Amino acid sequence: MDLPPGIAYFLNQLSLLFLPLGSHLSLTSLACALVIAVAFVAYGRWRRRRRVRLRTIVRALFPRRILLSPSNFADLGFLFYNLFLSGLLFSWTVVSYQFLTNGIMSGLAAAFGPVAPTTLPAFVARSVITVMLFLAYELGYWLNHYLSHRVPFLWEFHRVHHTATVLTPVTNFRVHPVYTFVFVNILAIATATANGIGNYMFGETAYQYAFSDTNIILVIFIHTYVHLQHTELWIPFSGALGRVFMSPAHHQVHHSTNPAHFDKNMGSCLALWDWMFGTLYVPAKEPEKLSFGVEPDNAAVHTLTGAYIDPFYRAAALVRGALQRQAAVPSLRDAPKT
Ligand SMILES: [Zn+2]
Ligand SMILES: [Zn+2]
């Protein structure tokens, strides 16, 4: 049956979002998150000697306060934009992953000489490349996120994610296109560097283990706790585990309006880079009272113009302010000679 092109595109985008195992919102990963969430809530009630009933669990997981909040509706709007429009409007990467990989390999070969192809079994080279690419993804994620918090111009675009007043797995899509643009390009540089070094090391092209082009280690994390980071279920990792892995509670702290939590926990699946660079906040075992949203009382942040257009005005005002300040400082060349 021939479908109109618009409908065919719509269905194709939907199937690409939900069906591949490597998708960031695959049905399998959502199902896994749901099973873990149900088990977590049921265990918590059982431990406190409360009755474990399906109705109370469903109510705990899907409270009306979250489902009906304007923030949640805005998140669904962002999902719609990411799913159906962003691919039509832009090509996101200006940095070519393959070009950069080849450049790194030939640079290393020029500096240290060519390397003979490895005699190690293929699975060893592939496993090492898989780990290297995953760590590079995490480092690129951390770096982009760190810059988005610390560079005022970039913050104006990232703060859109932090205007969410409730957290659901769809909040992951609440990102401004400028943030996405910087993110995918930093990611391309980080992963191409790791790929170039890895391929040079083994003297041949070794491919990572992946599901639909997504690194298999990342897929495992997406199927365990990544979705739960954007929920309000307090699932903390503490001690050594809390220094290596970014638990759901770690990321909830990242969204907190408490100044003690600002600019902490920038990682995606791992807390490792936060630990190394001094931006880690390991959450307490007992739930911390958190509230979310940088402008909780401003309804405009959940509208189309508030989320997509206003950040451009705010960023432009920052640039204008900086230029005016620079113009106000007399340059040394203009200073009277004495
Ligand atoms: Zn952030
Ligand atoms: Zn978040």
Image (cartoon, helix red, strand yellow):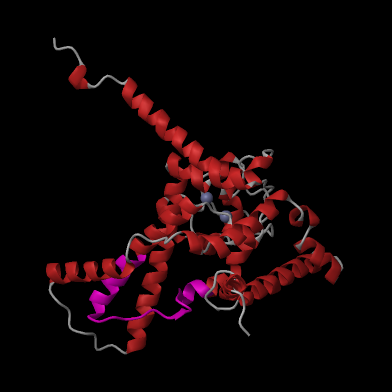
Q: Percent position (x, y) of residue 123?
A: 37, 87
Q: Percent position (x, y) of residue 61?
A: 75, 63
Closer-to-camera residue (155/125): 155
Please name the residue shown 24% across and 89% down the image. 119
Query: Within the image, what quadrant is residue 305 found in?
Result: top right
Please name the residue shown 56% across and 70% down the image. 222
Q: Which residue lies most toward the top here?
A: 338
Q: Percent position (x, y) of residue 243?
A: 50, 60
204 lies left or right of 146: left
Closer-to-camera residue (235/218): 218
Query: Within the image, what quadrant is residue 39 found in?
Result: bottom right
Extent of the magenta region: 191-219
Q: Is residue 206 magenta?
A: yes
Please name the residue shown 69% across and 60% down the image. 233
Image quadrant where one finds the N terminus: bottom right
Q: Percent position (x, y) of residue 325?
A: 37, 25
Closer-to-camera residue (301/33): 301
Image quadrant where one finds the C terminus: top left
